Image: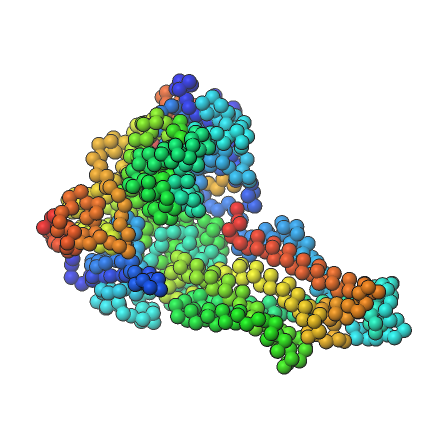
Amino acid sequence: MSDEKNNLLEVNNLKTSFHTSDGIVRSVRGITFHVEREESLGIVGESGCGKSVTMLSIMRLLEDNAQLEADSILFDGEDLAKKTKKEMRPIQGNRIGMIFQDPMTSLNPLFTIGEQIKNPLKRHQNLSGKEAQKKAIQMLELVGIPDPAKRMRQYPHELSGGMRQRVMIAIAMCCEPELLIADEPTTALDVTIQAQILDLMKDLKKKYHSSIILITHDLGVIAGVCSRIVVMYGGLIMEEGTTEEIFYQTAHPYTAGLLASIPKDTKEKLVPITGTPPDLLNPPKGCPFAARCKYAMKLCKEVQPEFTQLSTQHRAACWLLHPAVKQKLGEVKIR
Amino acid sequence: MIEKPNPLLQVEDLRMHFKLKGGLFSKAKFLKAVDGVSFSIQKGETMGLVGESGCGKTTVGRTILKLYHPTSGKVIYDGNDITEYSDKEMFPYRKKMQMIFQDPYTSLDPRMTVGSIIELPLKVHNLYQGKDRQDRVRELIQMVGLKPDHINRYPHEFSGGQRQRIGIARALAIEPEFIVCDEPISALDVSIQAQVINILEELQEKFHFSYLFISHDLSMVKHISNKVGVMYLGHLIEYASVEEMYQNMQHPYTKSLMSAVPIADPKKAAANQRVILQGDVPSPIHPPSGCPFRTRCPHAKKICEDQVPQLKKLNDDHMVACHLLS
Amino acid sequence: MMEEKGIDLENLSDELLQPLSQEERNTEEISRESVSYWKNCWRRFRKDKLAMTGLIILIIMTLLAIFVPIFSPYTYDQTDFLAMLQWPSAKHWFGTDKMGRDIFVRTMYGARISLSIGFAAAAINMVIGVLYGGISGYLGGKVDLVMMRIVDILTGVPSLLYIILIMMFLGSNVQSILIAMCMTYWITTARMVRSQIFTLRGQDFALAGKVIGETKWQILIRHLIPNSMGSIIVTVTFLIPSAIFQEAFLSFLGIGIQVPMASWGTLANDAIEYLFTYPYQMLFPAAAISITIFALNFIGDGLRDALDPRLKK
């Protein structure tokens, strides 16, 4: 494990469930990870794997039907899990910035761009109206919006998707947060715009010495931006490691399956992961991936595997890596 | 050869301009979604159509299926000019031309069971009767990897990938020859995308379908297509066989589009020389004069502003519309 | 190391290391039970206590309306000059009126008339509204323009004016009240259906219908109307109480149902002159109207919550 002092965020045994009319959906089922200062952590997984719920849990932005349990969510030494909604306010949007997938729904259509950037500046940084105006224009310029003074007076619907996402970034970064959580920030955008936005995020991270959690389903986006990756599936972490380890020393069959699903340069047939992700209304008792895993054994279906530490940074939860199983079966090559 | 004789589908100079409501005193405006697109598809061939949102690729697909009535140009299917066909005249062609939709959540009627969704095309075209029809529905649902006992369930009970496969089963039911795949995988998870692509490929091998594969995912298009067209702002700007396109791309837009694709390999991603385009795609209501790409093109010259570049042959397998290349 | 969940990691049995069979994987399994839209709605509706109370009250009221006049020793128009203006008693539960008619039977007979008018008006208006709105919304363009202008003109005419005219020409009876109400009541439904169809026809499943070769009518009837049924039912449920109220209002003014026939409005009208001396005569029909309208409104609210997918979790 890395140096504890250098960790900006430490999430310990986070569990989040939702009470719905069908029953209790266990979206996140006990995950532990950390974010170091000034690093970019990628959380990758398919829809419904719990990656967005994890972020909302950390920010304490869950809806009323959600139930959060965690040993601790330490942000710079403070336990966010124990804070009240009111105590969270100086952190949300100030020390932790957020960018969501759809910039249209996360911007308020009734206020101008300017008002929406000035708002957090006034609230968190106690800037006067004039100072906030100046800073807001600076921020818009910084995120590459041409003619910022004019844009300040416009409404969200007058901007293109890419521009809106830039405004979202300006709002998220205006208070110079220590941590920026970006939930699928480029999924709704075109590739050429996506490239612009990802570059912008990298630049701003460097400028403000922030950490980034980038949540995405796109391994390509993560490969270009993040230094460390957490792979989630069925509400649990499957594998965690540096980007190189995840891509080149893949240990978990799920990660390997994801990588194999992406078309290579050849016309070779794709190797999909068969089947469908588990329904977290009735989560499987064993490994959540067992039903789709080509290496799955009876053991996998019965007991959830623990993590095996593979290097200082690299760990994976798979029975094939467990010493007791290895002893019997030997090394199983995962591809 | 990129254009061969006797294609199954031929699109000639297709234009689709949508009329926007003009004010009382202002002239009605037009959204030029598709502005002069020509290409052809052979039997058993897959043509990929790529471009960013708003470039008109979806409109091309829908206009070919006569969901919209084109402003001008021709759609020729199997030698018959179907452009001016009425709904009634189109009916026999509905059996031959099908579509797979982008969003598996909205393309299936939520009030119908999966069985009746797949059965509907058979009912409309009066194919198979009684028990045969039920058997056919079961056969179709198994063909796309689902179970026959799923037929009494409703679409919302399935995952995105499963729903997309139901959509495929519906399109297959009447044994079409040509299928427009309108971004069939963009709403799906990575591991599921490969499943759907494999099903499409297997079915093509088995039934020799022709596909028009519309997508913004350049790597999937490369994987599945025989030839590729790149669209920008309603224009087809580059059109080539897949090998030619990905080895020898010429148009500055294609180049930057390709370089912007994120690579799922950290080493290659670090080595990738990206051409990051400035600015946004202009509005199709007020397209720029001349070349549609000139406002973002790093090499734009005076001629690009004055004249619309035509799609010209570079070699037998490659056509491109750029003043700077001719 | 991990806790031993009944599994000895030191001595793993070979059986546990067997690969999973195809059946054990069962990857396309759907664990949730299959629920149709309507079943799901009923499930949500059942959880709404207020709406369920409303439904029970409405059922009781309907049963009373059907059976009381059949089994009661009195009929609604039977006068008894020996028992005029009696206060409620064991013999006459709700008392009697100035002609000695039993108010309990008359109230329940009134329920028959009022409820039938309410449901019949709602049903007729639903049919007209769905057809009109559906056609207008689906065809769109010029047809829609003309059809909607006609609606605008109809709403422009004050309804009381032609209702009174119709009642005068056709006489004061149930049929003419229904006809009068059907003149404009469907407009709300029609407008609602039109806007629903407008949004639905652009959806992919409607396009999919066109791709497989369905005609416009088939798409309208197979896909668009069934998908707007939830909102239609909610709108129509709210039409019932307003129709009941309208009938009561007309009868109260004296241009609706005529004595000795009884509706809640006529009963209330009858009771005005004794409002201070025999207030029970007003109390019972008024209470019946209020309770029924409350019940129907609760049901409507409950239905809206149950049928509206936007509130679905």
Q: Residue at x 42, y 51 (%)?
A: B105
Residue ranking furthest to the bottom: C169
Residue C60 coordinates in the image, percent (x, y)? 72, 61
Residue ranking furthest to the right: C82
Residue B208 coordinates in the image, percent (x, y)? 26, 57
Q: Nearer the viewer, residue C306 or B166?
A: C306
Q: How many numbered tags mark residues here?
A: 0
Residue ranking furthest to the left: B326
Q: Residue at x 15, y 61 (%)?
A: B5
Residue C196 coordinates in the image, percent (x, y)? 47, 60
- Residue A278 seen in this snapshot: yes
Rendered view: A79 above or below C276: above
Q: Nearer the viewer, residue A274 or A220?
A: A220
**Residue A132: quadrant of the picture:** top left
Q: Residue at x 19, y 48 (%)?
A: B294
Q: Nearer the viewer, residue C179 or C252?
A: C252
Looking at the rendered image, the quarter that the N terminus of chain B falls into is bottom left
Q: Residue at x 18, y 52 (%)?
A: B291
Residue C260 coordinates in the image, percent (x, y)? 76, 76
Residue B46 relative to residue B21: left or right = left
Q: Nearer the viewer, residue C293 or A188?
A: C293
Residue C303 relative to residue A295: left or right = right
Residue C164 relative to residue B259: left or right = right
Rendered view: C48 above or below C128: above
The colour mode here is rainbow
Rendered view: C47 above or below C147: above
- Residue A222 seen in this snapshot: no
Rendered view: A34 above or below A265: above
